Image (cartoon, grey):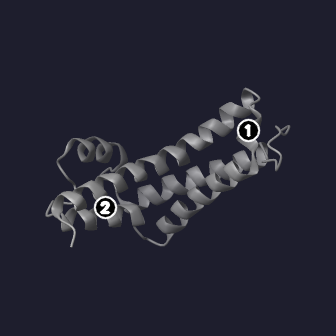
Amino acid sequence: MLEAPTFRWLADAVLLLHLAVVVFVVGGLGVVLAGNLMQWRWVNALPFRVAHLVAIAVVVVQAWLGQLCPLTVLESWLRRQAGEASDGAGFIEHWVQRLLFHDLPFWAFTLAYTLFGMLVVAAWWVFPPRHDGRRCSP
């Protein structure tokens, strides 16, 4: 059986993974937009664009189904296994959770995720991806 410090370390790792996913989803749109303006060919590479579209699609679908993010659920479970409150008090938990989690009604997140997803789809249409990574004209 794993001990509390191991569960705590795993919870921190999941929290950092969650942050990385958020940075990819939010930053990915910025990279697509800025990259096309700066004529960076790689930002329209099909694998990058598909991964970005799928990531935001998963978030939007989860929100519409009223489900919490599985990374949030896993982190909370790991913290409980470590004997901690799920909101943690350590350095990593404190600062990363302040960036990721906000006290708003669930519908506000669903609306924000949906609108952001629409922006990603619009960017897909304005700057279509290319299988060979070359820049497409809008």
Residue 68 position, x and y percent, is: 39, 66
Q: Residue furthest top?
A: 38
If the image is split into quadrants, where does the C terminus sit?
Answer: top right
| Residue 106 spot, x, y in % from top left | 38, 61
Residue sitting at 49 percent across and 52 percent down?
A: 112
Q: Amino acid at mark 2?
A: Glu
| Element under disc 1 | helix
Q: How busy is the neighbourhood of tag 2: few (under 14 within 10 Å), some, or many (20 plus)?
A: many
Q: Secondary structure at mark 2?
A: helix
Circles 2, 1 touching at the beta carbon (< 8 Å): no
**How far apart are the alpha carbons under marks 2 and 1?**
33 Å
Residue 33's disc is none
User: On screen, 92 above or below 4?
Assistant: above
Extreme-left residue of the structure? 83
The residue carrying pointer 1 sits among few (fewer than 14), some (14 to 19) or many (20 or more) residues within 10 Å by Cα, namely: some
Q: Residue at the spot x=35%, y=61% of the render? A: 72
Name the foreground residue: 52 vs 123. 52
Quick one: label 2 or label 1, which is nearer the N terminus? 1
The structure residue drawn at horizontal position 77% and vertical position 49%, both measured from the top left corner, is 125
Residue that carries the numbered disc 1 in the rendered image: 42
Point out residue 51 in the picture as x, y percentages from the top left corner. 64, 55
Above or below, comparing residue 99 to residue 5 in the picture: above
- In the image, 116 versus 132, the foreground residue is 132
Which amino acid lies under the numbered mark 1 shown in the image of this protein?
Trp
Residue lying at 37% horizontally and 49% vertically, measured from the top left: 16
Q: Give the residue pinned by disc 2.
A: 75
User: Where 55 falls versus 77 (above or below)?
Assistant: above
| Residue 114 horizontal/vertical position (percent) | 55, 57
The answer to which of 29 and 65 lies nearer the viewer is 29
Give whichever of 56, 122 is nearer the camera: 56
Image quadrant holding the N terminus, namely bottom left
Q: Is residue 33 left or right of residue 106?
A: right
